[in-house]
Amino acid sequence: MDKLTLILDNIRSAHNVGAIIRNAAAFGVAEIVCCGITPYPKIPGDTRLPHVAKKADSQIEKTSLGSSQHCHFRHYDLLDEAILSLSPESNVYALEIASEANNLTDFQAELPAALILGSEVDGIDLANIEKLDAVLQIPTTENKQSLNVTSACAISLYHISTTL
């Protein structure tokens, strides 16, 4: 799925980011765009202080287990900037619990595309939802409606890869 970009918006945990990178590598995602406070591996032209970049890289590596070598990374301060950086042909989808969300199991993605995964606690800012081509939701039982972002990522990538 080299025509799928993952956008990670304000994901706090470096361990979650590492697991997402591992999922992305397993499904052939070529690019991951990190926004806001999302930790990310060292990148060319990295503007972070060296000790900050080294710490994030080390923490991510614990769960990515070398998978970051298979993906290209970019960072933007704001989700808006990341969306604007995509090619005009890209469809932009978000994984989010929302009233207007499409059931993931009924959805077929069109590539090229970007899939946005939001903050573990706050999700994606609703102001950005209107800018998207579709909002997707993983069907769950009434016992618990949300999943860990890494689990949700794996389920979504699997579904997208099997429906193309």
Image (spheres, rainbow, N blue to C red):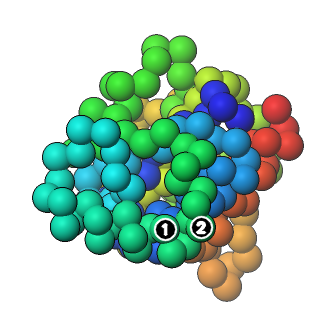
Q: Is residue 138 visible?
A: no
105 or 31: which is nearer to us? 31
Image position, residue 149 (x, y; %): 54, 67
Marks 2 and 1, Cα distance to the nearest angstrom? 5 Å
Residue 27 x/y as whole percent? 73, 48
Would residue 82 appear left or right of 47 to someone viewing this image? right
Q: How many marks?
A: 2
Q: Quadrant of residue 38?
A: bottom left
- Residue 123: give x, y in percent of width and height: 41, 61
The residue shown at (66%, 31%) is: 2
In front: 14, or 119?
14
Q: Which of the labelled discs sits on residue 25, or is there none?
A: none
Q: What is the quadrant of the N terminus in the image?
A: top right
Q: Seen from this angle, which residue lies furthest bottom? A: 143
Disc 1 designates what residue?
A: 61
Q: Amino acid at mark 2?
A: Leu
Where, by quadrant of the figure, is residue 58 drawn?
bottom left
Residue 14 vs 130, above or below: the answer is below
SS at circle 1: helix
